[in-house]
Amino acid sequence: MLAVLDYGIGNLRSAQKALEHLGADARLVSEPAAAVGASGVVLPGVGAFGRCALALRDSGLDRVARQAIDAGLPFLGICVGFQLLYEASEEAPGVAGLGVLPGTVRCLAQGVKHPQMQWNVLQRRPGAPSGLLDALPEVPWVYFVHSFAPELTDDTTATCEYGGTVVAAAERGAVWGTQFHPEKSSRTGLAVLANFVRATGQA
């Protein structure tokens, strides 16, 4: 079973349905007890960093996320769920993220439209092996909707260009994250999710 953490933020069923389309037993989980026995965990997120971080804690599902990561289970953060893996965000000063990945989420560059709401090309980071991005098309197009993104760190595996270099994906061990929405990114997005499903042993 894949646990898709449902902490009351936005419509999470699109991520669940995309995983089900790939044959995974993906379930929306709104209580910690329902995540027991999961072979992988997905943390989606839409909206604002601060609101999502507080809602995750209020639901108790932050403990599920930490326990899964500590146990080495495959873990995928999507959009704001990806941002929550970091220590903090300029969008919500004083609100802590999960701190699983080092760094701060920064506002996109001035001079470009906020949010970035468009298809954009992923650029793999040279020398950064990636299980998440394995076997993608040579020119992988994915869909973004965001005004903030994590800063570039050693965990970054892919970027895109939007008023400068923008972090699009990161990996540290079994912890994977995408700033883009794989569930909205057609075949390329399904390929990304399929890599995650395979990592959980559900393929």
Image (spheres, rainbow, N blue to C red):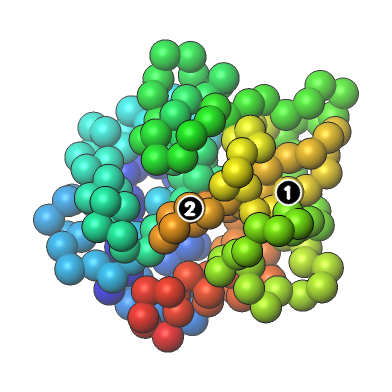
Identity, as a three-letter code, of the amino acid under mark 1: Thr
Identity of the residue drawn at 18% across and 50% down? 31
Identity of the residue drawn at 32% across and 33% down? 55
Q: Is residue 126 left or right of residue 130?
A: right
Secondary structure under tag 1 reads: strand
Image quarter where the C terminus lies is bottom left
Q: Is residue 139 visible?
A: yes
Total label count? 2
Query: Which residue is outermost to the left?
Result: 33
The answer to which of 76 and 181 lies nearer the viewer is 76
The residue that label 2 is drawn on is 172
Secondary structure under tag 2 reads: strand
Q: Does 49 appear above or below 140?
A: above
Identity of the residue drawn at 64% across and 54% down? 157
Could you say where residue 163 lies in the image, as x and y percent from the top left? 85, 33
The answer to which of 73 and 37 lies nearer the viewer is 73
Could you say where residue 164 lies in the image, as x and y percent from the top left? 83, 35
Instruction: Give the Cα distance between marks 1 and 2.
Output: 16 Å
Identity, as a three-letter code, of the amino acid under mark 2: Arg
User: Disc 1 vs disc 2: which is toward the camera?
Assistant: 2
Q: Does 147 appear above or below 195?
A: above
The residue that label 1 is drawn on is 159
Q: Does 4 appear above or below 168?
A: below
